[in-house]
Image (spheres, grey):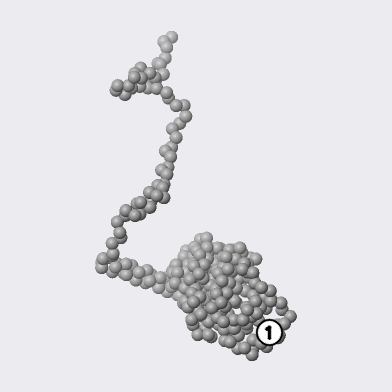
Amino acid sequence: MLPGPAPYQPTYYPPVGSSTAGAQPHIASQPPQPPQPLRPPSTQRQQVQNDTAPPSRPKSVPELVRDKLDKMAVLQARQQLLTLLGRKEGDILVICRDEDWRIHSWIIPRHWNLYDKCSHWDKENHTIDMSQDDPDAIAIILKYAYTGDPELLSAKKISKTPFQTLVEVAIVAQKYGASELLERVHCELWALDVEAANKAPVDEAAALAEDALTALVRLRQCANMSKGLQLFQPIVLAFLRDCLQFRVMPASLRQLLYRCFEEDRWLAILIIKFAYRGDIESTDGLLTTTAGLQAPTPSPSR
């Protein structure tokens, strides 16, 4: 019986001038490893690249015109989408107290849990009942779902009570899983200007402080429902404290106000009104009616 063919051995060609001529190569038994990813350049190298980068040139006239046309096209597209929402031709009916909308199921983001978290979902009639939510907040999130326009959440445009409206939008967004709306509300709350509010007339400043306090109480009511809403409490409270610091207010009233956050919301609102308007007689009478309340010194963490 003839022997079979010998197993194949790779031919090794040593480099020219090498002293290892005739030696057999070492063949690794492990499979080849994938190439390692490149490490990012160091911070010093990035800084050098940023320093040596050429300065950005100003935009030419055609580029400015094109940017303006792009913005106009975006605004026109958003207006058309709002018109689509207003036609009430969608396949799903949304009811919120006295308001109703016809929405398109293919426009609403898939990660929004409208059907699971609503008050009632009638699958046969394609009807969503959101009567437990705020109608203004529902209108804002539906318009945002259609257009993605951040101006819908602008605190200067939504209503005369920006704090309450933004807080209601945050509560609805947290309930239905609209995380992008929570981020927008967070930015808008930080954008409220305390100094500009305190330069306003006394009645407007008092109304804004009352709005902030009402929103804070609303947040405290919902804080146990969601941990995400607790992030908005320090923002509203800081705004309210800054308002009180800008205006002249007796220390006793300020301490009593912090106590009223938990005891009596309407009493705290009255204190803010009297503090802004400077009604000394009404303030003294208010102190006599609240003599039973102790006014501890507020801690910095509150």
* Quarter containing the C terminus: bottom right
Classify 271 as above or below 234.
below
State whether residue 94 appears in this view: no
Taking the view exactly as shown, the residue that stands out farthest to the top is 1
Q: Mark 1 — residue?
A: 287
Q: Residue at x 71, y 78 (%)?
A: 293
In the image, residue 66 lies at what x, y percent? 29, 67
* Quarter containing the N terminus: top left
The front one of 177 and 106 is 177
Identify residue type, mark 1. Leu
State whether residue 3 appears in this view: yes
In the image, residue 178 lies at what x, y percent? 53, 64
Q: Residue at x 38, y 51 (%)?
A: 46
Q: Residue at x 65, y 66 (%)?
A: 224
Residue 269 falls in image quadrant: bottom right
Classify 230 as above or below 23.
below
The front one of 105 and 188 is 188
The front one of 107 and 261 is 261
Q: How many marks?
A: 1
- Is 190 placed left or right of 45 in the picture? right
Taking the view exactly as shown, the residue that stands out farthest to the right is 292
In the image, residue 113 lies at what x, y percent? 56, 63
The front one of 187 and 122 is 187
Classify 111 as above or below 15.
below
Q: Secondary structure at mark 1?
A: helix
Taking the view exactly as shown, the residue that stands out farthest to the left is 61
Q: Residue at x 61, y 68 (%)?
A: 300
Residue 67 falls in image quadrant: bottom left
